[in-house]
Image (spheres, coloured by chain):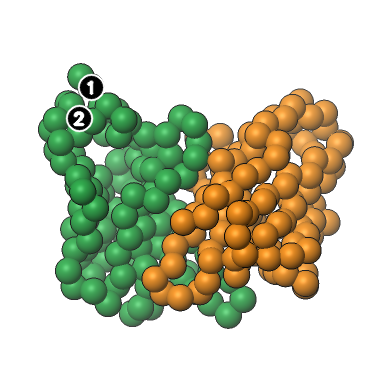
Amino acid sequence: SAVISQKPSRDICQRGTSLTIQCQVDSQVTMMFWYRQQPGQSLTLIATANQGSEATYESGFVIDKFPISRPNLTFSTLTVSNMSPEDSSIYLCSVLRDRASTDTQYFGPGTRLTVL
Amino acid sequence: AQTVTQSQPEMSVQEAETVTLSCTYDTSESDYYLFWYKQPPSRQMILVIRQEAYKQQNATENRFSVNFQKAAKSFSLKISDSQLGDAAMYFCAYRTPTYNTDKLIFGTGTRLQVFP
């Protein structure tokens, strides 16, 4: 498995502001992902963070709203821009060490975001 | 598109008893991977068990086992000798490796309560 940390663990923000969430892994990984979990809901993939290139976004998510960086193989950030109360969710980072069939996605502890 | 369905929003079990959580999925792929993740109140997503679609043998991990029925597209989780620490949300997930992503598709989750 991998040891994954996220900062901040939680935050309360005002509408219209932006928050950047950091994800740090204890070893190099091939793939990093960002998921959103709205209150009482399941997890939905926002995007795949690609090292050295633009992230790959899922349908319904756009770069202007959720810019993502991945400067190296152990670190990624997700920014939630121009926040509204609808953005209140848990945001989770996950990693895949390599794309072998035997590998599994492991998740960070999540960031609980509340937008007032 | 692949979908994952968990038809039991909530389940309960007595300590030391056995409980089965249901999951069905829809896919046209022949090779894929299935997972059960556990999310306790701490919100950390924890891998419980995984199953490769090409394997006929059902996966087991200590007190956790699956009943994988590929033709029926069913993937249920059996928890034996339930413990208080098993209380959590359980998510069934399907993995679909594609060109530039490796997304997990989650079901809506089943909340498991364990009574002493």
Neighbour tally class for label 2: few under 14, some 14-19, many 20 plus, Cα within 10 Å: many
Q: Chain of mark 1?
A: B
Colour of chain A, in one word, is orange
Q: Is residue B61 visible?
A: yes
Which residue type carries mark 2? Val
Vertical placement of residue A65 versus B97, above or below: above
- Label 1 residue SS: strand
Q: Is residue A16 left or right of residue A1?
A: right
Label located before the other in sequence (2 or 1):
2
Neighbour tally class for label 1: few under 14, some 14-19, many 20 plus, Cα within 10 Å: some
Q: Which mark is residue A41?
A: none
Quarter-of-image position of residue A32: bottom right
Q: Which mark is residue B13?
A: 2
B68 or A84, nearer to the observer: B68
Colour of chain B, in one word, is green
A9 or B103, nearer to the observer: A9
The residue at the far left in this view is B17
Residue B83 spot, x, y in % from top left: 23, 30
Disc 2 to disc 1: CB gap under 8 Å: yes
Residue A101 spot, x, y in % from top left: 41, 74
Q: Which mark is residue B115?
A: 1
For marks 2 and 1, give the CA distance.
6 Å
The residue at the far top in this view is B116
Q: Is residue A46 left or right of residue B111?
A: right
Quarter-of-image position of residue A26: bottom right
Q: Chain of mark 2?
A: B
